[in-house]
Image: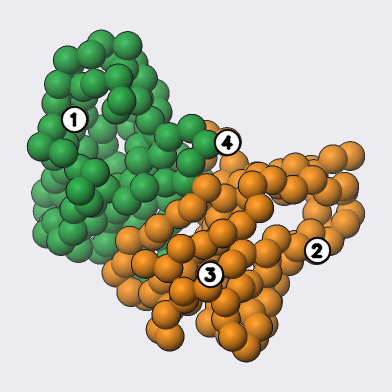
Chain colours: A orange, B green
Amino acid sequence: LAKTTQPISMDSYEGQEVNITCSHNNIATNDYITWYQQFPSQGPRFIIQGYKTKVTNEVASLFIPADRKSSTLSLPRVSLSDTAVYYCLVGGPSGSARQLTFGSGTQLTVLP
Amino acid sequence: DTGVSQDPRHKITKRGQNVTFRCDPISEHNRLYWYRQTLGQGPEFLTYFQNEAQLEKSRLLSDRFSAERPKGSFSTLEIQRTEQGDSAMYLCASSPSEQFFGPGTRLTVL
């Protein structure tokens, strides 16, 4: 399973765009990149998944360069409620019966 | 609320006691996963069910741990002879595609 590296923590202010970058140098050809969000005392929550280029949904965008050795989660105009731990994972697509391999995640703190 | 429920939400026990946790997945989800999460770390995979069949187990799942999913519906995770190192959050997830996690059961072993 490909290992991921992401910053331990990040601070931002309300209303700003936040970009969290994840390195996955050993990503396999058939691996997808998935991001989860976790609030204290809750289970992780799926945010977004992509394979290449750019994916956008109602809460975030995911940018993946051509070499796929890194990816960037972009959160537009963050609010205090976006304070959480964000995990980057690589592995099979959502439809595959795969276990998820989490790293230590990035603690994002949004300040007023 | 993802629709996955876990019971109890908190459990305090003494070392050596047995504990059992329950997970009720979203009803139409045939896949069910158990993970364990310690403070400051991401969740670690424990085991996976497809319907009632336990298809994969992590090496983290020692002989003291057992999981069942009778009839492919709810699942139970039992820990026998608990140790202080078992203190963690135990998370259940279910999926047809992306995994939906429950709120977890926080176990404290004194």
Which residue: 75% across, 42% down?
Answer: A109
Between tags 4 and 3, which lies in front? 3
Residue B66's quadrant in the figure?
top left
Q: Residue furthest front?
A: A25
- Residue ID for mark 2: A76
Q: Nearer the viewer, mark 3 or mark 1?
A: 3
Q: Is residue A73 left or right of residue B84?
A: right
Type of residue at label 1?
Ile
Q: Position of residue A55 (x, y in %)?
A: 64, 79
Q: Which residue is found at the position 48% from the left and 41% from the top?
A: B41
In the picture of the structure, the residue carrying the numbered disc 1 is B79
| Dot 4: chain letter | A
Rate crowding at label 2 as few (under 14), some (14 to 19) or many (20 or more) other CA atoms within 10 Å.
some
Q: Give me the C-alpha separation between circle 2 and circle 1.
A: 43 Å
Please report contact status of discs 4 and 3: CB closer than 8 Å, yes or no: no
Residue shown at 21% from the left, 22% from the top: B82
Which quarter of the rendering shows the N terminus of chain A?
bottom left
In terms of secondary structure, where does tag 3 sit? loop
Q: Which residue is mark 4?
A: A40
Instruction: Give the camera-side residue of A75 and A21.
Output: A21
Q: Earlier in the sequence, mark 3 or mark 2?
A: 3
Q: Determine which residue is flagged by label 3.
A: A24
Q: Is residue B34 above or below residue A97?
A: above
